Image (spheres, grey):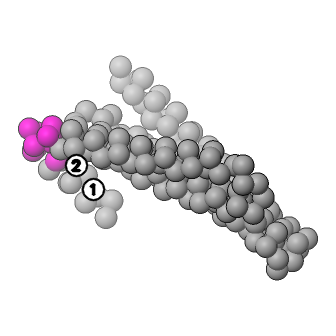
Amino acid sequence: MKHLLRLSSYLYAVLTMAFVAAAVVLVIIAVHTGWQSVAQEGWTSNGALGVIEAVGLVTAAVAALQIAQTIGEEEVVRDAHLGAPTRARRYVTRFMVVIVTAMAIEALVAVFKAIHEDLALLPAVSSILIAVAFVLAGWGVFIRFNRDAEELEPESMREAKQEDEKFD
């Protein structure tokens, strides 16, 4: 069992590096997209649309970096295997912050594109915004249910806070 846990830590480290590499590629593509848009379209609304698309790519890159950081800290550095409700809640919460923020920014980018390119896309964009609201509500329910579990295990909360002090 010890070897499997060590192997999983190595695999998580590789996954972390893959997310970082993907983020770097996305940033490079975003810079190229924004630069080309302004170079070809100039300082016009079409040029702005290209820059807005670049912002969407940067958002995806930031999300990839945040996920890499979460996986790296939780699974590789801390070697936490999510035994306590506190650790599980914090782990999921970190992912949810990234996902909700990225979805909301992508929805805003899609709104700008739909308004300027094709109004028929607005129902699809609004469905993304509704999905963000549902994910946010589900996350709130998750946190509420897990708070009750934390109150039953105050020791795990103290341990989690002690681990956090190592990273501050």
Residue 153 in the magenta stretch? The answer is: yes
Image quadrant of residue 3?
A: top left
Residue found at the far right of this picture: 40
> Is label 2 in a helix, a strand or a loop?
helix
> Is 130 drawn above or below residue 106 in the view shown?
above
Q: Residue at horizontal 78%, vertical 58%?
A: 117
Spatial distance from mark 1 to mark 2, Cα to Cα? Answer: 6 Å
The residue that mark 2 highlights is 160
Q: Amino acid at mark 2?
A: Ala
Along the viewing direction, whichever of 14 and 40 lies nearer the viewer: 40
Toward which corner of the image does residue 32 lie, by quadrant? Answer: bottom right
Question: Is 45 in the magenta?
Answer: no
Q: Relative to residue 16, is residue 156 drawn left or right?
A: left
Looking at the picture, how far across and down is residue 111, in whole percent?
A: 64, 58
Decide: is 65 above or below 3: below
Start and end of the magenta stretch? 148-157
Q: For the image shown, how many numbered marks are present on the structure?
A: 2
Please report contact status of discs 1 and 2: CB closer than 8 Å, yes or no. Answer: yes
Q: Nearer the viewer, residue 97 or 24?
A: 97
> Badge 2: few (under 14), some or many (20 or more) residues near its Cα, within 10 Å?
some
Q: Which amino acid type is marked by label 1? A: Asp
In the picture shown, does residue 82 fall above or below 166? above
Q: Give the labeled residue for mark 1.
A: 164
Q: Is any part of residue 70 visible from this angle? A: no
**Badge 1, how many Cα within 10 Å: few under 14, some, many 20+?**
few
Where residue 153 sits: x, y (%)?
11, 39
Q: Position of residue 7 (x, y in %)?
A: 47, 28
Q: Residue at x 14, y 50 (%)?
A: 158
